[in-house]
Image: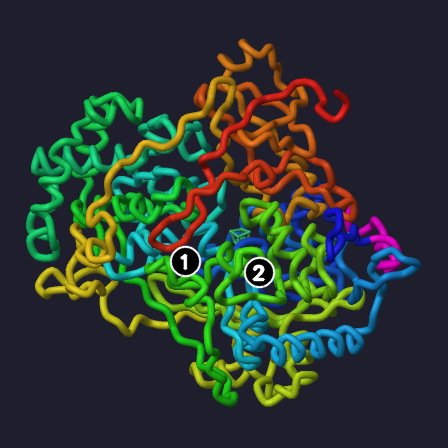
Amino acid sequence: MNNSRRKFIKISALGIGGAAVTASSYNLFGANSYMEELGQENTIDILKTTPTYCEVCFWKCAAWTHTNQKGEIKKIIGNDNDPHCYGRLCPRGTGGVGMYDDEDRLKTPLIRKTVNGEETFVEATWDEAFTLIAAKMKGIKDNYGAESMALLKHGSPGSHFEHLFKAFGSETIGEPAYAQCRGPRETGFGLTFGSWVGSPEPTDIRDTKCLVLIGAHIGENMHNSQVQEMSAAIDNGATIITVDPRLSTAASKSTHWLAIKPATDIALLLSWMHVIIKEELYDKAYVKKYGLGFEELKKHVQQFSPEWAYGITTIKPAEIRETARKMAKAAPSVIIHPGRHVTWYGDDSQRARAVAMLNGLLGAWGRRGGFYFKEKIKVPTYPHPKFPHPKWSWKEIGEKYPMAQMGITNELVKASIPSNNPKYPIKAWLVAGTNLPNTIPNKKEVIEAMDALEFMVVVDTMPMEITGYADVVLPECTYLERYDGIRSATNREPSIALRMPAVKPKYNTKPAWWIAKNIAEKLGLGDYFNYDDFEEVIAWQLEKMGTSLEEMQKIGVKNFPRKSGSMYMDEDKTHEFGTSSGKIEFYSQELKDLGFDPIPVYTAHEEPAPGYYRLNYGRSPMHTFSRTANNPNLSDLKSENDLWVNPKVARIMELRSGQEVWLENQEGIVSSFPIKVRVTERIRWDSVYMVHGFGHNNKKLSRAFGKGASDTELITKVNIDPLMGGTGMRGNFVKIITENPKIS
Ligand code: SF4
């Protein structure tokens, strides 16, 4: 960062002087005592219950926050009527109170200033912060157009800022949940079935007879209702087939664990289709009625025998055949799970398409035990003036990716670097709830972009690394202290859930709706936020939906009857798919016309050089991305990640469990912090594995700083998906260094 316009500031110096909270709440809710307390009958306190939905991850389980008469949060438990959680929160959801208790939270607005020749943060009033933000936003609009102001967001707060940006005249908006996570599967399933998978995924796991997890980790990613349904499916005798280079928790519960060579999934998927078609195990009536391009697919997969796939995937032909037959036997009550984080090798939309096509061959879409037809209820829009029409937006920035349907964060980053001569230049960012240096690969480029910006605002609850690059830092209160939009998600039956404050915001923190509204008012856009309190908006919306705030405060979750008909296909009628042909497209003319493969093909990916291992990363049930690493309850349960190393490699390198090592990637980037080795047969010899989200380098995260290693830091090679712009991040390799590189 020499000669940098914007110097990284570790939030400290003159800033963030708010009084540290006493340790009592931490001790009280420290994970072990907290968990014990959950099991005890509380006979002393009379607890008040307030509805919320969990913000620790995106599953948004509805819950009750229990507070005592002193207004202290005692526990959070699941809402029995919620289809996202069936009354049970996962370990990290029950630890959500740690977000509220964390004494490292951002406490008051901060503005970057130069004091005695040094850049630092100084505390500011909200009004000072809003005045500065509005002046800078107006300046960007006058000089370049409102479109040059970009919003990068994640989670519930994002919708309030999206509203602000649209009122301001900018739709230059992106979120890592698309290009760094599930975008490719939406493209692959959209091209095949004409429908996005969405969240929660419409997988009918509770009634399935065969669940195939190919790079999906139900359990470690804690998709709550899916975990519970998978457990029920296992009890009911369902076959579970897990394809993973690592013996994940799901793999350990499976009938078959296929320890595939990384980067070869498409070969396996093509081979499965080969077996199913060759042995005529596919759903003939369904494929005849709904399939388009089956003959082309049949011809295409003819060559991809299990023997061919064995040489690529290392999975034995007999096992490929046996698992294909088991899927077909269970069909149509079979699910080849679409996965979630699927940005791996750059051909990810095609990989997702192969998953979708296999489901299509087996007749799983619209069938019990396969994929049900989801339904949600629309939350009415609170009246506001019409948004202005921007001259350009995320669409133009991502125009070279014809299938992109949301802003591509990495393209927004590139458009923020002047030396790229962007056609649609971005000059300023507002970042809400996403720690971009730990989220978007190629950290160097993210930092270069931030450095070039004329202005940057970060809204967060915690002093994540990104706050150090901001001009203004705005402290948001946690989900337990605020109203947010009504949760309405697709499911078997439509449901809504209410989030309301259980306690007052701690410190000088505020909810996102209030921050967005106040910035709008400073910009003269107050008409777009025509209410005093967001509670009014929710009350108005609930009335329109046939309920009321009073009712929702009592029940938390309301389930509505379906209006779109049965969850499953009516076999006597003909279903119309959402593709342009109205059919399941095994062959895509649309892709062909755009110059892409109309049916997925397997392409070999780069191999690691001698001495290097494939860097695989994943999730822990205790943590969500990098955002929970400092949570006092959750860091008690898991405070750092470790490096899974196969015993064969450990023997050659004389490594032992617990030993600290450093990692160096193919471009010579060395991990900032060491990571402890875990010698285990559960990982292939050609790969190492670590949980994502550790290795924080901001000292203000007192529990997370320096704990474990950051995978994102080592992901510098990115393979971009040519269809939708997603960042394939699994093509990175590391070697293991046993001596501290900072000393030698
Ligand atoms: S799955 Fe767990 S962390 Fe995610 S929303 Fe549900 S309870 Fe919260």
Compared to residue 267, the image places residue 425 above or below, namely: below
> Which percent across, then down, holds residue 671?
64, 32
How far from the left and from the top, in percent, is residue 95?
Answer: 64, 49
* Residue appearing at x 62%, y 63% in the figure: 432
Which residue is under mark 2? 416
Does the segment drawn in magenta span residue 249?
A: no
The quarter of the displayed image where residue 675 is located: top right
Q: Is residue 22 magenta?
A: yes
Could you say where residue 391 lies in the image, as x and y percent from the top left?
46, 78
- Magenta part of the protein: which range? 12-26
Residue at 33%, 27% (x, y): give it.
Answer: 258
Q: Which mark is residue 51?
A: none
Of the pair 58 and 124, the residue shown nearer to us: 124
Q: Foreground: 314 or 91?
A: 314
Q: Residues within 10 Å of mark 1 (few under 14, many from 20)?
A: some
Judging by the rendered image, the residue that carries numbered circle 1 is 199
Of badges 2 and 1, the one in the foreground is: 2
